[in-house]
Image (cartoon, rainbow, N blue to C red):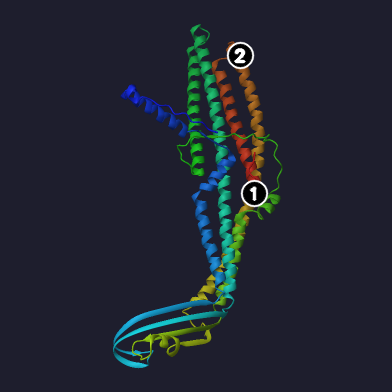
Amino acid sequence: MFKYQIFYTNFEALGSKKFFLFMVSLLSVGNMFAQQIQVIDLQKAVNLTLANNLQIKQASFQAAISDENFKQSRFEQLPSLDGSASVERRYGLFFDQQSGQLLNGTVDQANGRVSSSIPLFQGFTAINQIKQNKNLLLADKSNVEKIKNDLTLNVVNTYLQVLNNKDLMLVTQQQLQLSSNQLALADKRFKVGANTLADVAQAQALQATNQLNVTNAQNAYDQALLNLKQLMEINTETPIEVVAPLVADVSVISEYKSKEVFDKAVNALPEIKLAQYNTEAQKYGLKVAKGRLYPSLSLGGGINTGYTSNSPFSFKEQITNRNFGQSVGFNLAIPLFNNYRLRAGYTIAKIRLENAKNTELLTKNNLNKIINQAVLDLRSAQKRYLAMQSTLASSTEVFNVNKKRYDVGLVNSIELNIAQTAFNKAQFDAIQAKYDLLFRSKVIDFYLGNPFTF
């Protein structure tokens, strides 16, 4: 249970200046709470992106339209029912349909009709249209999933880039602190005659280089954070803190075979299903176009009535008895010549089907190429990571030895600078190799349909 305590202040006793400072302090406290840092882990980043992304919403709208088209095509099999009514006053010379007379004057008329039509045969266009619209709906739903998958992969890449740049920024800060300590030592030894001015200049140059590295690393980190915020569609002014996951030994990566990965991906990825549904839709589209070349037969019927002020009978008598009529009959429509529209539609439908088949094959071929490249990239990233770990270990040992020797005056600043530069480069390369390997492994997980976890 929460307890609230109200503080009463005598603002008149405070005075205007103190009152102003008091209000400023309150606003500052409010702004501090408003700008609390949001802690973002990978799952939250993915969830925010999928919830806020406008491209997903746009694709969902298209899927909703396709759903309505599918529903409407199913109702096409039902009888139609239409009604009409009119009331008018006619002037001059005209033929009165209700009284069967040629009149010249002013007459009030009222007419009503209800009609219905039942399709008996339409070349199976209705059933094929239903199947086509169903596959178009499934294709649009697959497109939504495809966009979600692409965004998720993009978020993972950007998220890891943030972590990579954050680690690089921390390393550059450590290197700057180390070079500052070395500059202080070089200056101290110069004052007692143990170092030359060139040694001091070397230390200053190294410090300046590391300061630039800190600035560049900070800029890269800020840019990666901005990219992540934009993916999540959140205010770019909102402070966030990206959580570094507990990553297992990334050097232990399963061996993958391209064909095994492809066989799973081709049956799971929505872009493949999208292409397959589009092909099926065009198959039924061709059947719809072919069905329109056949005659169509429908059963129709209706009732109608009317009223005219020229008749001696009452309104009720006219509309219920005198002018009340019924009709029923068949309607046969035979397409003989329609300015080549139906034939052109059939030819275009065949072309669309062949294009859809080609697109499906192209999608599968591209996926096969991408997976082969992804497996190769993973192997290369693993080899590079192991090589960078070995290089980092050796360069660290070389730098530590040279630093100890420099501290006692056994090596000069140039030799130390060379060792530290190699050490710094090895640190950068090792960090980048680690996150590159991590991302490459997640790409394979993506194609296998595995969740993005660390």
Closer-to-camera residue (211/302): 302
**Tag 1: residue type?**
Tyr
Q: Which mark is residue 405?
A: 2
Closer-to-camera residue (186/80): 80
Closer-to-camera residue (340/238): 238
Position of 412 relative to 363 (above/below) = above
Position of 268 relative to 156 (above/below) = below
- Quarter holding the C terminus is top right
Q: Horizontal placement of 432 versus 206: left or right? A: right
Where disc 2 sits, the SS reads helix
Quarter where residue 92 is shown: bottom left
**Tag 2: residue type?**
Arg
Residue 282 in view, yes or no: no
Mark 2 residue crowding within 10 angstroms, few (<14) / some (14–19) / many (20+): some
* Residue that mark 1 sits on: 447
Residue 229 at x, y percent in the picture: 50, 40
Mark 1 residue crowding within 10 angstroms, few (<14) / some (14–19) / many (20+): many
- Quarter holding the N terminus is top right
Q: Residue at x 49, y 50 (%)?
A: 54
Position of 209 relative to 374 (above/below) = above
Position of 195 relative to 11 (above/below) = above
Q: Residue at x 52, y 83 (%)?
A: 300
